Image: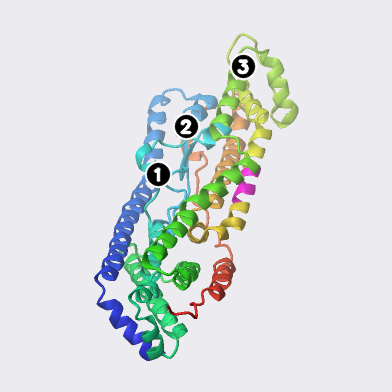
Amino acid sequence: MKRLLQIEWLRLRRSSAAWWLLGGLFAAGLAAIFLGHAFQQAQQVEIADLDTQFEKQSQRHEHRYQEKGEHSGYWAYYSFFPVHQPPSPLAAVSWGLRDLAPFVTWVRLLGLEQQLYESGLGNPQLQALGQFDLTFVLGVLAPLVLLLLGHDVLSRDRGLGSLPLLAAQAGGLGRIFAARLLVRFAMVALVSVLLFCVATVVLDLPWSADSLAWLFIVLVGLLPWLGIAALIAARAQSVAASLSAAMTAFVVLVILMPAMLNLTLSTLFPVPEGLELTVRQRQVMHDSWDQPRQANYDSFLARQPEYRGPFPTVPEADFTWRWYYAMHENADHAVLGLATQHLKHLRQRHQWSQRLAWLSPPAMTQTMLCARAGTDLDAHLLHLETVRSFHQQLKKHFFPIIFAETILPPGATRSFPRFTSPAPAPAAPLSLWPPLLLAALLLPFARPRAVLS
């Protein structure tokens, strides 16, 4: 078998088509690495500049209120507090949702639901094309190269009529079949490992357990495609038939199957858009301006009586900050059920997409890689929970002084809460049984036909 592997390696090395495919894969991987480097640097610069921006904001407030101070409601209204989600080292190779979902949220003491889903507008044409990261290259393009290299390992010689002679010289059709597929798999795997090594240098990735697990997922994720290539090569009678089967399998598994899964899960678990939550919350807020103020204020105090204090009533004609912030709290409470349903259905859809991802090997690989990099939906939902927690911290600081009608002197910003970056969440346990099981189910059927005609 060792001699057969050496012969097949020499044969593949003389193939210009193989070099073009492997070279193209390597070039695409390099482009993805440098794009990921620029992407991560931009995020790190933005996060590093948050403290400076907050200090400039504080200085403007200090200058504005330097003479006699100002009501605490004004300080809270004009103060924005940055909450960020730091990128993991692997976020540069698995962007996940970080190019779409906000990783920095500037929080105010107003209604929270209208702030959670605000994000900057990107280029819609670039977003429609999708992300081009190393996960895409190794999870989608590498399997395509493996299919193109392995679909005709038997059909080309079968068409030339030389397959019986080769089988006789190799000691059996199965031996040459396995040798050719293993060499092609090894070449694609080698390019994947080389790209990961380049990424560790360019992106300064640590050789940690998470990084090695990420690479291991990539290599294991190629096994189902090896089974698909073997199945096609064993059954096809001509190069044209094997190429057609390979392209059909790729389109079905990469495009059609994920689209069908997404459509099915969207139907089973309809998720209200974040924009709908924002609109509903603001509508309740705007309607409150035309309603009796004392009734709104009493509704707030019924839920949070600790803020009744010395001012249990509000004037109907004059504006008060106590009534204004109570109105925002009422608006958040009014959409609490919708917000809970939104998060519940998001989690259910994500859980089922993880369970059904084995139906589409690229979706399965990308899901596992993004989870390992901390850039999937779970990481985004954790960021939203962090924003909620910090908003509660702001309320605990400001509400007692706002509802006591406190005047804050210059320098008050020094005592304001500041967000501190949380410790990174531990990576989810690594489970590789879906790709291994899929490969195990495919390979027994990938036996070359005994008839060599």
Magenta residues?
344-350
Q: Earlier in the sequence, mark 1 or mark 3?
A: 1
Of the two numbered discs 2 and 3 on the same chain, state the one appearing first in sequence.
2
Q: Nearer the viewer, residue 126 or 240?
A: 240
Q: What residue lies at 60% left-to-right and 30% top-to-bottom? A: 401
| Alpha carbon distance from label 2 to label 3 | 25 Å
Residue occupying image coordinates x 43% and y 62%:
246
Residue 162: x, y in percent?
34, 81
Q: Is residue 23 above or below residue 260?
A: below
Residue 177's quadrant in the figure? Answer: bottom left
Classify residue 294 by image quadrant. Answer: top right
Can you say which quadrant of the picture contains the C terminus? bottom left
Q: Colour scheme of this structure image?
A: rainbow
- Asked if residue 266 lies left or right of residue 129, the reply is right
Residue lying at the far front in this picture: please name it: 453
Q: Quadrant of residue 136?
A: bottom left
Which amino acid, mark 3? Asp
Q: Which mark is residue 51?
A: 1
- Compared with 82, 353 (above or below) is below
Which residue bears the numbered disc 2?
Answer: 79
The residue type indicated by label 1 comes to: Asp
Which of disc 1 and disc 2 is earlier in sequence?
A: 1
Q: Which mark is residue 59?
A: none
Does the rendering let one see residue 88? no
Q: Callout 2: 10 Å neighbours few (<14), some, many (20+)?
A: some
